[in-house]
Amino acid sequence: MLAVDAVNKSNSGHPGLPMGCAPMGYALWDKFLRHNPNNPQWFNRDRFVLSAGHGCMLLYALLHLTGYDSVTIEDIKQFRQWGARTPGHPETFETPGVEVTAGPLGAGISNAVGLAIAEAHLAAKFNKPDTKIVDHYTYVIMGDGCNQEGVSSEACSLAGHLKLGKLIALYDDNQITIDGRTEVSFTEDVLKRYESYGWHIQHVPDGNTDVNAIAKAIESAKRVTDKPSIIKITTTIGYGSPNKSDTAGVHGAPLGEDEANLTRKQLEWAYDPFVIPQEAYDHYRQAINRGAQLEEDWNELLTIYRNKYPKESAEFERMLRGELPNGWDKDLPSYSSDEKGLATRKHSQICLGALGPNLPELIGGSADLTHSNYTDIKGETGSFQAETPEKRYLHFGVREHAMAAILNGIAYHNSGLIPYGGTFLVFADYMRGSMRLSALSELGVIYVLTHDSIGVGEDGPTHQPVETIPSLRAIPNMLVFRPGDGNETSGAYKVAIENRKRPSALCLSRQGMPNQASSSIDKVAMGGYVLEDCEGTPELIFIGTGSELDLCVQASKQLSSAGHKIRVISMPCVELFEEQSESYKEEVLPSSIRKRIVVEAAESFGWHKYIGLDGDSVTMNSFGASAPGGTCMEKFGFTLENVLAKAKTLLNSP
Amino acid sequence: MLAVDAVNKSNSGHPGLPMGCAPMGYALWDKFLRHNPNNPQWFNRDRFVLSAGHGCMLLYALLHLTGYDSVTIEDIKQFRQWGARTPGHPETFETPGVEVTAGPLGAGISNAVGLAIAEAHLAAKFNKPDTKIVDHYTYVIMGDGCNQEGVSSEACSLAGHLKLGKLIALYDDNQITIDGRTEVSFTEDVLKRYESYGWHIQHVPDGNTDVNAIAKAIESAKRVTDKPSIIKITTTIGYGSPNKSDTAGVHGAPLGEDEANLTRKQLEWAYDPFVIPQEAYDHYRQAINRGAQLEEDWNELLTIYRNKYPKESAEFERMLRGELPNGWDKDLPSYSSDEKGLATRKHSQICLGALGPNLPELIGGSADLTHSNYTDIKGETGSFQAETPEKRYLHFGVREHAMAAILNGIAYHNSGLIPYGGTFLVFADYMRGSMRLSALSELGVIYVLTHDSIGVGEDGPTHQPVETIPSLRAIPNMLVFRPGDGNETSGAYKVAIENRKRPSALCLSRQGMPNQASSSIDKVAMGGYVLEDCEGTPELIFIGTGSELDLCVQASKQLSSAGHKIRVISMPCVELFEEQSESYKEEVLPSSIRKRIVVEAAESFGWHKYIGLDGDSVTMNSFGASAPGGTCMEKFGFTLENVLAKAKTLLNSP
């Protein structure tokens, strides 16, 4: 009824799911969920994910009823209003107690796979036979929409493969989607599909009233420890509404006052809007004492652990505090220009090898491109599998979108793990939905995106990013790096690791490039910096990134020896440059100097912020072609000759 | 062996799949595929999709062997070289005979669902009991990677629902992906999963040599007319290579000369590289006469059809010619400023209703947001279902990515159908992989993307696009429209329908906006045009789109009455404006006038191309928030007050 009332009051929202799922919400939260309402961040709590995020009033109601400060009855009355802690979809950054930001369907269940991986990994890493300090379940409520989205198929197939026994999904089988009955588009046998993934399956035919059956099914699911579980719970959307239940109309629109009253009558609910009987509070809020006791017991266990296993506990507690270990970056390599240039994907591999031993919380892998992305950690063998969850390398399979959602899930676990994942840059498109959520939810996921331009070569335009870098730069709160050599790759990793509240996308080359004489690990943190300079005021400024940085340096050399005053700015991260002080930006890129040329083997889109109406660029605004990478670079104009020609034209202009 | 040789010669490519799939390729192309090598565009051919596009040498070999002009032995020797018709992944626009551009895994099988939908629809629409002029199969070869990608899960679930009996997929079960054996990440029971979707399933255990078993399975699949079929064919990747077969090493790297020789020995292949025995040509190229006969038979059938059913045949043949019907746009509405403004999603619905009766080839739907996207065609009932394939409304379910891939498939069918599909703009991210392929493959798909800004309101930042419009504008060959009223919405449809060689993304508002006095249907084709102007040279130019266009007009009015000279440019499609003549662009946006302000409720990213270093914008560079749409607009600065303030600052600047 809180959902009915809140949606009516805001005149906007989704009452149908909360009405149909109230029994499973009650069963799960009252009888199973181990959590502490007074400390939503208690580490060893069970994680609850409302994957069908539009039904967020169910979650807000449960948070409120069980006594979370974060959702008062006033917050519920402010449902979906400016500044409220009860936004229209659950957002971790707005509401303590919300474990994942959900709304884009399929994301939550896929995040939950990440949460379960994080738990399994930490349990295997830290637990001792006598002290299990990491031990919780991950529960999910998901709907038909979640089950139709491909990302959930990917993630749940992997979850079955990994035998994540502590992942339990309650599937709200209400047979209604926005277009009407699921029979218009969705008639597959969902449980059979999950069985094919290796999940344990159950069905509760009456989810509207049979709380006992739901509870028994959850108990059974908990007993199956070598498989994730899905419980299909057949419900009626909008259950209790005499005229709107079991229709698409109750999915995402208010019942209205009249129907709300009829619903009260049908459900024999004698209370006014937003009124909760004390009896209900008294019952639900037993969770407060229970939760306090759970945390106290765990704290005692942690004390024992601390005493018996001081080294392990020091690492564990450091991670929970979100602190990086001392010297984590000490082995990040630096380079002089004498050293042979490598592909930045190769530099990235060296960085991962340098970070691995010093940064045990680094965990990640690749979407089946390990030996192309070079995402392995040197010296380590084996991967996270059902039998070896202590390993930190993840084979995601050819499942980019699930990879990103799972990385988000690992970050949402908030236990200090630093998740990274690799694929080809062009396939960032496949996982963009979840990359956006990394940015929105302030998750320090590191995306290792190799093969970053037409330099990819023979694989051709389906594999050659052209617009991908600009489109990633457009995402708020995302750091997009395109390092220009070994030092800048080290610098990019340094910043990415330090940024635990925003994601980083490392765009890395397939092909080699020289190490620059003046490149800097530390200056990457400024986003852009003067790499090569002239005496006095420059006539022209080159701005370069990645594999084209060296073209700028070469062109600058030639023009300088012809007497021109040229500056080269390396711009490995536009977003960080934007954040610098106005004086720094003015110093690097004086507003009076309008002869500016950007060189980047990508779309020019976005670069006019720096080149304005008077500058120029060596970029490309078409798709690439299948040919050796060097040929592509040449044919699309990324040559010294072309850079020089454009520079001379600009130098000769008024 | 052609694959081995071509990959060796180019020193780049994927020999493993062609070697393992040669038997199924042979069985399918020699015994089943109805095609005409001398006319790759013969309409009634079976469609063959190599979803595992990296194995393209299999396809090029089959095209060459069966006698297509498009792939000569010289083309094969030029595999993956600049300008060759044999690019590193199959591309429709490079090689006649290639039905879909594949490479990004999962795309091809999902396109195939679209091809099968197109066939089923046209068959139901045009066939008569005595003359079946539309009657072909869609065959696919797919690999483990395709089966791991979520997009294929979405599409194949829908294919099962729709009982697409003429879709037959051969699944190359070679148990190898790039990271090694599939056992590291992919151990689900694939056939059981397809069975859960409603597919007919079979298994051929020896795909390396048992051509008869493959042929029998295809025959069985053809006999099952009420279900799509998948045949799991167990093969050995790189079959025939004594040292590299059954390893990830043979997936994407040349065998090298030595191993190629050993392979020749093992397979008892006595011919030099690129040499095909005449006996093989003679056998394969029976396809030429067979194909000519098939087309001749079909032409005869078409003659009969033309005589018996002149009306139907006129429409059918017009569609095949790619001609739009006379008067297709005659009912597109125009508006005066007196008429009440609507949301552009509502204008879009009116356009679809106006186009529907005059444009029978329009076919589309929504990813389960019909009543939010307003993608229905007024006056039509029912949808494309197994029992009603003659209907043209598609319920895609909550499957955005599959929707886009299926729309691409319908376009690839190249039979005049004009596919469109709707979802929320923010969920373009979910289908971006396939939207990119629409652009790359020159497919005139129309994306109807509603809820185009923070104007979405209460659903909050997960549902509010901010960076989505810029990120779509970054895609080459994609038209991105953001119409500012009713006329511009009609204009956007007009251009989108006419553009059969590039996709259009219509970004449409949830909320209402006024009709402008000077807006124009026809001027949308110019991309940008002067909507309101002053006498003489403007001091300041506003550039507006969509729901913010009216803010520009209002601000202009106020400033004009205060004596300023102001121009307002409406810019519904940046890409089209860019394509106009330099003189037109200069006329609309004189380069000397640098006081320019863009107003658009989205990221500023990309707009500096017009505002340069001296202009300004009323845009936003953060995510939105959950609150009523009007509140969001106000809080994020999309107010007349703010627009005026920025304008005045600019007007007062030197």
Image (cartoon, coloured by chain):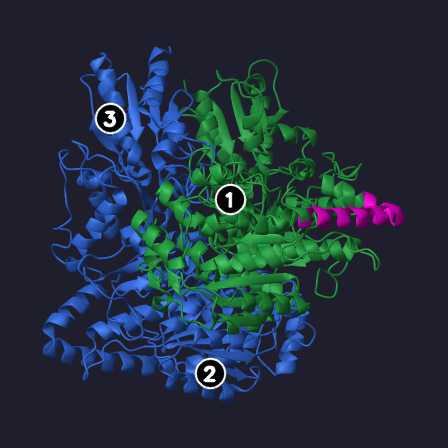
Chain colours: A green, B blue
Return the x and y of residue B299 as percentages of the image width and height.
Answer: 21, 78
Residue B553: image tag: 3
Q: Residue at left 11%, top 79%?
A: B308
The amino acid type found where label 1 is placed reads: Glu
User: In x, y percent, where is residue A535?
Assistant: 61, 15
**Label annotation for residue A634:** 1
Circle 1 marks a residue in which chain? A
Magenta-drawn segment: A290-314
The mark that comes first in sequence, 3 or 2, is 2
B644 to B496, vertically: above or below: above
Return the x and y of residue A153 as percentages of the image width and height: 52, 63
Q: Which mark is residue B85?
A: none
| Numbered disc 2: secondary structure | helix
- Asked if disc 3 and disc 2 are in contact, CB closer than 8 Å, the reply is no
Q: Quick one: label 2, few (<14), some, or many (20+) residues within 10 Å?
A: many
Q: Residue at x 57, y 28 (%)?
A: A577
**Which numbered circle lies on residue B27?**
2
Classify residue A336 as left or right of residue B632.
right
